[in-house]
Amino acid sequence: MHKIIALFLLAFTAAAQSSIPALIPAPQTLEPGTGAFAITAQTRLSILTPAADVRKMVIDNLPGIPASDAPKLTKAITVRVAPVTGVGPEGYDLLVTPIGITLTAPEPAGIFYGLQTMRQLLPVNKSFRDQSVPALHIRDQPRFGWRGLMLDVSRHFFDKVFVKRFIDQMAQYKFNIFHWHLTDDQGWRIQINSLPKLTEVGAWRVPRTGRWWDIENPQAGEIPSYGGFYTQDDIREIVRYAQERHITIVPEIDMPGHIMSAIAAYPNLTCGKKQVVVPPNGKFYKLEDNTLNPCDDSTYLFIDKVFTEIAQLFPGPYIHVGGDEAYKGFWEKCDACKATMAANNLKNVDELQSYFIKRVEKIVQSKGKKLIGWDEILEGGLAPDATVMSWRGMKGGIEAARQGHPVIMTPYQFCYLDLYQGEASAEPSTYGISRLSTAYSFDPIPDSATAPGINAKLILGGQGNLWAENVPNVRHAEYMVWPRAFALSEVLWSPKAQRSWPNFVNRMEAHFKRFDAQDVNYSRSVYNPIITLKKHPMGMMEIMLSHELPDTYLYYSTDNTVPDDHFPLYTQPFLMPKGADRVKVVAYRNGKPIGRMVELTLPDMEKRVQ
C-alpha cells in the first residue's frame, strides 16, 4: 500500500510543479502567465542600450538569435537598461508573453542575471531557435550582496581552463564573488615579479597521492615536480573573464600562518630563518615554523611587495589575508618577538598577531584595498577597518558585527564543501559532514535569540568554501561543489520565507539534467541512505536509517544478502541481531531504487560510535 501512496503523491507533486519553471535560485516573485513565446528564425534581439559591453553580453548569452536595430520590432526579445521600481542594482524584471520577451534592469548586472534566468527557461546545449518560453512575469533581486564560492588551488593545483569553467558554473547560479585561495603551505600559485623564488620554489612539491592524513613526508633526494602557478597574464585573463560575468575576484594570500610555501623560498621570513621544503601534507604543523616573523621589518617589506602586485592585478576592493590557524609557539620562544611585545605593551601572542594584522591592514589600505580575514583576526583585538569572514561557526561573525565590522558568514557546518555530503561509507575519503539539506538550511543572519541587537546590514552575505586537501583533480572538485552550491545560491539570493526543501529537490533534479548535458560531475549523494548509530545500554548496536529526500523508502538486510524492496521496510530503529556483522541499506523512490546501496560492517560501526 505504501508504494501506491508514494506514487500518487509523486504524481500529484509533479503535476503541481509542471507549470512552474525549475529555476535556481528561486526568483523573488514569479507570476505564471498564459501561453508561451515561440523563438523562431524570425525572432530578433532588440538591445535598447548603446553600451557595447551590454550588447555583447546579451548576444553571448542568447547565441543564434540575431540582433537588430530596426525600430518597432514585433515578436522580439527586448533588452533595456532602465529603472525598475523597487529593484536594486542587481535586480531585473522579466516579462514573457506570447508576443515577446522584455528584460529590463537598472544596471548591467541585473541584465546579466536576467539573462541567466532566461537561459534556465530554455533547453541546455540546444539551439535557442524553435524553442518556447513559458509566459510569466518575474521581478527579482538578491537577498545578499555577497554570494561567494571559494576555490583552494594551493593544496592541489587547478589550471586556468578549469578556473574559467568554475567561474562559468558560478555565473549560471548568480554567484558574484570568487574567493581565490592562491597560497598556502602546500603551494604558492601566483607569479610575483619582484619575488621570483615564490613560484620558482614555492609552487612545487614532491608528488603524492592518497588520503591527506596518510601522505608521507618528502624523502631525501626527491624532486619537487608537482604543482604549478598562474602567470600574471593568466591572472589578468581570468579577472577579465570573471568581470564579463559580473563576478568579483577576492585574492587570498594567507598569513601569518599557512605560508610555508613562501618560507621555503625565503627562509628569512621566520623567527628561526630555517630552510624548509614545500610540504605535501600537514604533518609539519607545530614541528616546523610556518609562520611569518611579526617582529622584523623585512617581513612587512615582503608583504608590501606582494600586495603591490596583487593590488595591480585584481581591481576588486578586497584583499583577503587569511589570519587563521597561526601557530604562535615559535613566537613565544623568539627574543625579537619578546622585545616587540614588551615595547608595544602586548600581553600575549594573540595580541602580537593583532599587532601584525593591524600593520598588514595599513599596507593593504596603502594599495587602495580593504582587508578581509578569517575570524581568528578577532583574537587579540580586531584591526580598525577589517571585514571578518566567520568560519568556526557564526560566533566570530556575531562578535565582529557587535563591534561594527562587516561580516561574511561561512560556518563550516553549512558551507565547507570539502566535507562528506552523504553516507561516508559510500564517499571518497574526507572528514566531517555537511549534507545538501544542511547547506539548504543555512541562513547568514543569526537568530535574534543568539545574537540580539546586531545590525543585520553588517552581514554582507555568505559563501561556500572548497578546500582541496582531499580534492586531487578537477572532476572531484565539481563533485564536491555541486549540488551543495545550488543550495547555497538559493540561500544567498532568494527570500528566506520562500524556501522549500521538497520544492528545491524537484528543481535540483531538473538541473541535474542540465549538468548532464554540460558534462559537470555533480554528486548524487543525496540519493543514498543515511546510517546513524547508537550504542544500546545492553551493549548492542542500535541502527537508525534516514534519507534526505521526501517520499523515499528504505529497505535493509543484516544477513549479508543484497536488499531490494522485498526486504524489511525500515520504520523505526532496530538492534543488530546477534551474530550479524554488517547492515546493507537501499533506497526506493517512485517504485525504483535510487542512489547506491550502503554497507557498514560491525568494526566500522564500532569506530563510528566511539
Image (cartoon, rainbow, N blue to C red):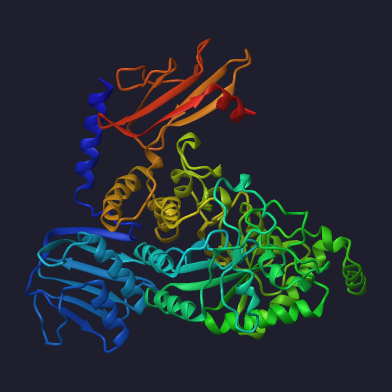
Left or right, residue 510 beside residue 429:
left
Q: Residue at x 48, y 68 (%)?
A: 178
Q: Is residue 564 visible?
A: yes
Q: Quadrant of the N terminus?
A: top left
Q: Is residue 85 visible?
A: no
Task: Tally the marks.
Answer: 0
User: Hey, which residue is sitting farthest front in the picture?
Assistant: 221
Above or below residue 4? Residue 282 is below
Res. 366 image quadrant: bottom right
Above or below residue 91? Residue 500 is above
Q: Residue at x 64, y 49 (%)?
A: 216
* Residue 218 image offset from top left, x and y in percent: 67, 55
User: Hey, which residue is sitting farthest top in the picture?
Assistant: 578
Res. 372 image quadrant: bottom right
* Residue 191 image offset from top left, x and y in percent: 57, 77
Q: Residue at x 69, y 78 (%)?
A: 303
574 or 272, nearer to the observer = 272
User: Hey, which residue is sitting farthest bottom in the picture?
Assistant: 50
449 or 420, nearer to the observer = 420
Left or right, residue 24 beside residue 37:
right
* Residue 195 image offset from top left, x and y in percent: 65, 80
Q: Quadrant of the C terminus?
A: top right
Above or below residue 190? Residue 157 is above
* Residue 524 image offset from top left, x and y in percent: 37, 43
247 or 327, nearer to the observer = 327
